[in-house]
Structures are given as structure tokens and as C-alpha cells.
Image (cartoon, helix red, strand yellow):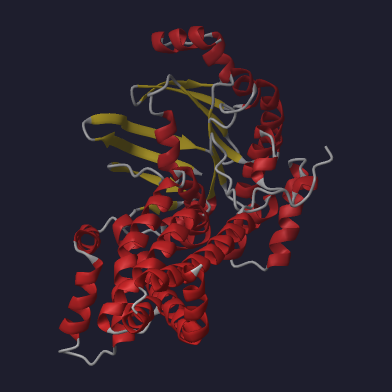
Amino acid sequence: MIEIRNLSKSYGKLEVLKNINLSINEKEVVVLIGASGSGKSTLLRCLNYLEVAQSGEIIIDSDKIDIAKTDLNKVREKVGMVFQHFNLFPHKTVIENIIEAPIYVRKKSKSEASAKAMELLKKVGLEDKANFYPEQLSGGQKQRVAIARALAMEPKVMLFDEPTSALDPELVGEVLQVMKDLANDGMTMVIVTHEMGFAKEVADRVIMLADGNIIEEGHPSDIFSNPKHERTQRFLNQIL
Amino acid sequence: MIFLQNIVGIFSEHGLAFLKATWTTIAITAISLLFALIIGLIFASFKISSNKILNWIADIYIGVIRGTPLIVQIMFLYYGLANIINLDSFTAGALALGVHSGAYIAEIFRGSVQSIDRGQMEAARSLGMPYSLAMRRIIFPQAFKRSIPSLANQFIIGLKDSSLVAYIAVTDLYNTALGVQGENYMPFETYFVVGIYYLIIVLIFTWIAKRLEQKMDVSKPKEVSIA
């Protein structure tokens, strides 16, 4: 589903990603972990070209991405993204947030997009909030709307960039539950998170990054109970 | 008491002339500001653009306009451009006022677009929206709302600045006052009267702007949450 080859990214002299190679299968749930500055968010953002890597290639759903030639908007349609700070459109209601891209990008009719949006809102348990504005929602509700908004484009892959980091502790669970349901539905997911419990339960693979390198990867039970790399051990000790 | 009598006299004698002039002032202001909004939008886009040449063009335009007096710009356009193309004073005045306000409005738009959280653009792009669509549908509506107070301020400045077109013989409010006081030798009363005209227009406009601002405030709940 996703194939990353020799991906490197730097900001000026600072190398954030160093020659990353990674392949992600269909329906796989991959969790990226690592200390802040390890490059995990950058790697995720490279996958839908919010960050443009200097070298390397990314193949998503068998389309090789060459930024000069490929229509990035088409790639982004296939890749849904959920942000730490939700980034809902504050001037639009919940349902308007969700139908915006299906209508203006996919050229769907308003009624078709709205029907789909209501279905998605039901899925994330917010069908009664369709006509609310984002600012009237709690953080957890906002993030669930953001997930529904991304799903409305029927992506092949969902990227989550620390989706629960900005939430009050009591609201984390509802978002993780939606993500779990999504994983159970067979969505391919790449998640940057510090929720190790969630990673243990849901992830098929955990990838540890440090200084722009993948230093360790494996099944969560192996990584968490028996980390091989000294950096992984230290990181897990600090966080757990 | 004589002051009041004189004022009433000016109103009854020149009321119609002032009313006509009010129309001219409002028309030249409205046309120039419409023009300024378009210029402002274009040059704000130039400034935000990643194209260096467009940035320079915008910087030069804004720099020159902000760096020279409006009266010089009006004279330059009217007497300078009139040699090349035939411009009547009203058109030249509206053009000069528009070009002038446009520079300030460009900066207002640029500031409010850049004040929108970068995550908004990222979210729009990640949904597959092309840059221009994301700008039009997501960024500009939010930026516009944010720029209303500054725009209203600029509009008021534009209205008052329009009095300078009197110097290229547009018969606006100020020019009418000039004529009236030359006739009745009562500058004190005449400028008092014309001041009232300007004040009333500004107050009405301020009220409209306030209403617009309230109306644009989408944060007001459409529905009450029962949960």
C-alpha cells in the first residue's frame, strides 16, 4: 500500500529524516514512536506531501509520487490526515466541514455528500451535532469530526499526527475508540502517538525513530516487552 | 444665537447643494473603495505569493503609495495622466483615492490572511483541495471576517480623504463648503455645517459596519446544545 524508499528530509543543515525505508501493507496499523525531534511527525507529513522530502520516493497505492509530475491533490485525496489540533474549519458547521471536500474536490452533489456525512457522523457518534460549529464542541468531539471529515474523502490510508495529544485526559478514550473501530474495519493507518496502551492493543507494527532513523521495529508485544535497542529502552522507560 | 441663526441660514440656503455634494462624496468614496478592495485583494495575493517578482511588485506599489502624500497622488494622476488620456476630475479622483486606499487594504488583507492558523491550509490541502480553492473557500472567508474592523477604519479614512478631490474641482462636500464660505464670508459656520455632514455619514457607516461584524460572527450558536 505504501512504499517509502531512501527518503531524506532536512531543514537547512538539520537532517530530520535519514534515508528512511519502509513499507506498509494494506489494512496494516503502524504506530510511529520516538522522542520529540525524532522525525516521526515529519515522516508522517511527508506521506501526504505537507512536507516535501529532498530525496527518495514514496509509492502510495501503486502510484509513484514524483512531485514534479504527479498531481499531489490526487494523492492527498487518497490519504486522509488527522491533526493534533484538529484544524476544523471554524467558519463552517460540523456537516459543512465534512462535505466541503467531497463537494468541491470530488464534485459530489450536496445531497449525496450530506447523506454520506451523516453516516460518518453516526459512526463517530456525533449525528446530533451536525449543525453545530466546531467551537461549540469539546476537544474529543472536534477530533471525531476531524476523523469523519477525513473519511468523507474515502481515503485508502489514514494518517494520525498525535491525535490525542491536545485533549484533556478524560476525552482521549472516545477518540481512541473511534480509531480502534476504524482499524477493525480494515483501514490502513499510520499513527504518531504517545498512547502506548493503544499501540499495544491496536497496532500491527510499532516503529521506533531516533534522530531521523528507524532504529527498531516489530510487533508491539516484542517492542514493548523486549526492546532491543538501548534508545528504545530508554524512551519506553521515560514514557511508561 | 447669531451662530445658530447663521447655521440655519446655511442649511436653508445651501441645503440642496450640500445634499447633492453628499451624494458626490459618497459616490466617489464608494467607487474608489470598491476599486481599492480589488487592488487590495490582488496586491495582498502578490505579497503572500511565493513568487519573488510578485512580492517586489507589491512592495514597490505599497512603498510608493504609503511614502507619498495623497494630494500629490491626486494631482499627479489628474494633471499627469490627463495629458495622456482624457480623464474627467471625478474619474481621476476616484482612481487616485482607490489606488491610495488599495495599498493600505492590501496590507490589511495580507495581515489577516497571515493571521489564520497554518493548520487551516494544511487541513484543506490534506483533503485534496488545490491551493487556490483552499484560499478561496477556507482561508479568505476567515481572513475577511478578521479584517472587517480594520477595513471599516480604512473606509472611514477613505471617506474623509475624499475631501482632497476638491482640489481637482470635484464638487464634493468639501468643495461645496469652500464655495459657500467664499460667498457668505462665514467660514466658521460653513465648515461647522460641512463637518456635520461628514460626521453623520461616518456615524451611519460605523453603525452598518458594526452590524456586519455581528452578523459575520459565526460563533453564535445556531442551535442550543441539549447534551
Q: Quadrant of residue A222?
A: top right
Q: Is residue A68 left or right of residue A179?
A: left
Q: Position of residue A71 (x, y in %)?
A: 41, 60
Q: Measured from the top left, where is residue A184 in percent x and y?
A: 70, 35
Measuring from the top left, give residue B84's x and y in whole percent: 16, 89
**x 83%, y 37%: residue:** B227
Q: Residue furthest right?
A: B226
Task: Give the side of residue A110 with respect to residue B78, left or right.
Answer: right
Q: Is residue A206 above or below residue B47?
A: above
Residue at screen point 77% across, 40% down:
A125
Residue placed most toward the observer, B113 or A128: B113
Residue found 70% across the figure and 22% down from its top: A170
The residue nearer to you, when weighing B191 against B126, is: B191
| Front-lying residue, B170 or A213 | B170
Measured as percent of width and height from the top left, residue B91 is found at 32, 85
From what the image shows, is residue B182 above or below residue B154?
below
Residue at 44 percent of width and 59 percent of height: B151
